[in-house]
Image: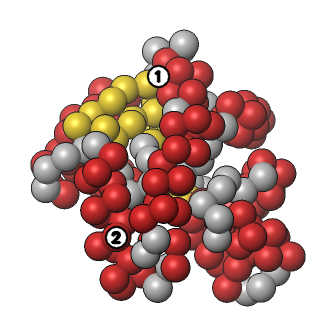
Amino acid sequence: MINLILFGPPGSGKGTQAVGLAEKYGLVHISTGDLFRSEMGADTELGKQAKAYISKGELVPDEVTVGMLKNKVEAHPEANGFIFDGFPRTIPQAEALDTLLTGKGTSISGLIALDVSEQEIVNRILNRGKTSGRLDDNDEGIIRNRIAVYEQETAPVFDHYAQSGKSWKIDGMGSIDEIFARLCARIDTFQ
């Protein structure tokens, strides 16, 4: 079983790469962004809470995120593994994920961080904003705030998994296919 955390700031390409990786390795792709959008689209109480934070470029509180994630993992007992895209975002979330997986007799295989420059991230998100329908993708101030929040609150998760030798950075610049090949080369070492 492969349990992979695809890591990096917003706009680094996690979602794009996770779809192909899930298909290639037969894994369930869990995107917290998709979970949030689904809950917000259904106008659930969790969705309303998430929307208030996301609209300001802030992180959704752990109890909301972890609850959504646990439900998604438990909905796929047959899975050969998972790709976590956009989670964990904090050390407490990483610890909650570790506990969840340990309870299922498994653990994180590795965390792979996509290394992309801040200006490239801003450009990618603004470009995505032309078609995503997400207001937060069209405001450079919110985008830069999201990057700052990532650096302050999320980047330490890399070190959490590095302590057990499970964190790697790969170059997230270049074509989608070039980045995919780099990711696959690293994931193939997990098997």
Residue 126 tag number: 2
Task: Give whichever of discs 1 and 2 has the lower sequence position.
Answer: 2
Query: Residue 87, position in %: x, y?
Result: 59, 47
Q: How has the structure been colored for display?
A: secondary structure
Res 16 visible: no
- Residue 79 relative to residue 22: left or right: right
Q: Nearer the viewer, residue 191 or 91?
A: 91
**What residue is disc 1 on?**
166
Secondary structure found at label 2: helix
Q: Amino acid at mark 1?
A: Lys
Residue at image position (81%, 69%) is 49
- Is 69 above or below relative to 171? below
Residue 82 tag number: none
Secondary structure found at label 1: loop
- Residue 185 relative to residue 139: left or right: left
Q: Amino acid at mark 2?
A: Leu
Query: Residue 79, position in %: x, y?
Result: 56, 54
Residue at image position (13%, 55%) is 175
Query: Residue 97, position in %: x, y?
Result: 69, 39
Res 180 visible: yes
Which quarter shows the C terminus? top left
- Is 128 above or below relative to 87? below
Query: Residue 55, position in %: x, y?
Result: 64, 70
Residue at image position (33%, 30%) is 169
Residue at image position (79%, 76%) is 48
